[in-house]
Image: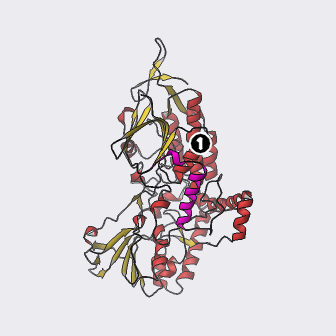
Amino acid sequence: MTPEHEVLVIGAGFSGIGTAIGLLRAGIDDFVVLDEQDDVGGSWHANRYPGIAVDISAFSYSFTFEPFASWSRAFPPGEELKAYADHCVHKYGLRPHLRLNARVVRAEYHEVEHVWEVFLADGTSMTTRFVICATGWLTKPKAPDIEGLDRFAGDVVHTARWDPSLDLTGRRVGVIGTGASAIQLVPEIAPLVQQLHVYQRTPTWVFPKPDVPVPRAVRKVFGAAPWTQRTVRLLTDTVTELSFVIAMIHYRRFPFLVRAGEAVSRLYLRSQVKGDRDLMDRLAPAYRLGCKRPSFGKGYWRAFTRDNVQLVTERIERITETGISMADGDEQKFDVLILATGFHVLDNLPPFPLHGLGGQELKEFWRAERFQTYEGSSVKGFPNLWFIVGPYSFTGGSWFGMIDYQVTHALRVIGEARRRRATQAVVRPEKHDRSFHRVLRRQRNTVFLHGSCRGTHSYYFDERGDAPAVRPSSTYEAAWRARHFDLDDYRYDRADPVPPGDRTEPDHFGGRWHATG
């Protein structure tokens, strides 16, 4: 079987865009980028709820090789992130490589031919030598598991599937969830609605958002001298690494960094809800900073001081046709329910069945053996496959920093396979296991093993108590490892017919392969 393409990239969000640009810069142009949506941008194309904005400085939330001089603010709104995605696709000529409205339903590896076959929802399939999975985290909205949700007679909308025609003016609105989406949404809609009830299961650590406008003169300087913007990025990256990543992954060594962050957040809370001790107590998290994703807020806590806004922390019993019924029997009537309940994250990796050597399905492997990867990128028994966002990929710092080091990792191996004229590259099991055990050792020093993390309902954790959504490493270390890991940690094979008398050896799944090095 001769593959139709050398590389398939699954996902056309920023992870897929960065991968495609990396392929072109590496001299690989036989690739296709698949995405189930009708345009590029991933979450920034799909998510359009009121107040949506990036919650990390845009100077860090962009490719290092492609600074964007047109940001209007330090934390720009969602449409500017979508515009940046379009800019990158146009500048690097990616449109001919895109296949949109193409949802992957499964992928199977043909181990004799060393070819992946990727099946699409329209009944077609494509074959490729290499697959790079860039599907991201925030792709499958998660509805709350509450009895009666399907019986509510009013409008129900998830923040990730916002209906732009929905008018909230003068209506009674209930928001379920208090994560990153709610923190942006609530202050935007509070002045519009008649009444707003926000249902909180677990409070979130919130920090003041220094969302200052970027003056036109500064933008002109950024455009004329890109190095000035890269200097600003170095500063924002460093602040992020020191204030969150280092504090989180080296918690046992530097617990004072976490306590300092908590003190800053509590001061901000007091300044926002002045004098209301009961409200302050209900909004203040009881767990260590880092157990659950923190966020930058702009008026979120203050919104609860409005007469028409109420925080509800009691348990929801059920949803009725007209509203929400609580465990104590009280029922609040609503016209609209907004689900700000986030996404399926770990249980959506990958978002389709993926079968490797011996027919092993990846989710089943992870379910039985724990989430694990080699350097956050590849998995033993799954040749010619790399993840941009997988278990232990993201350090918690710059998302674009992760894209850069993950693309670097995959392209180094693909380049080595090309150099050796190999058709298969698979991480050696002993190297994979060593990498995974190093992650587990490091995890002992993180904040994630602090007892207060239990019960936070954080997507960082799986059912075993591991935190595979975060790599216990700084972004700088992860980037260094991507550039310097030993390429012989992979085994390189050829699918050519083996000449008589040539050496063949069984692989660890029982197949045969022709060794090249």
From this view, report whether residue 499 is shown above or below residue 305: above
* Main secondary structure found in the magenta portion: helix
From this view, report whether residue 476 is shown above or below residue 290: above
Q: Does the magenta stretch include residue 476?
A: no
Magenta-drawn segment? 74-101
- Crowd around label 1: few <14 · some 14–19 · many ≥20 (10 Å): some
Of residues 169 and 449, the one drawn nearer to the viewer in this rendering: 169
Residue 82 is at least partly visible in this image: yes
Instruction: Give the residue type that dot 1 points to.
Output: Leu
Of residues 442 and 171, the one drawn nearer to the viewer in this rendering: 171
The answer to whether 262 appears left or right of 112 in the picture is: right
Quick one: SS at disc 1? helix
Residue 84 lies in quadrant: bottom right
Q: Position of residue 159 (x, y in %)?
A: 42, 67
Specify the farthest residue to the front: 96
The answer to whether 235 appears left or right of 188 in the picture is: right
Q: Quadrant of the C terminus?
A: top right
Residue 59 lies in quadrant: bottom right
Residue 285 is at least partly visible in this image: no
Q: Position of residue 468 (x, y in %)?
A: 47, 51
Q: Mark 1 points at which residue?
A: 24
Q: How many labels does the image show?
A: 1
The residue that appears at 45% across and 58% down in the rendered structure is 138
Q: Position of residue 192 (x, y in %)?
A: 44, 82
Q: Position of residue 94 (x, y in %)?
A: 55, 48
Q: Does the magenta stretch include residue 76?
A: yes
Of residues 329 and 210, the one drawn nearer to the viewer in this rendering: 210
From this view, report whether residue 216 is shown above or below residue 42: below
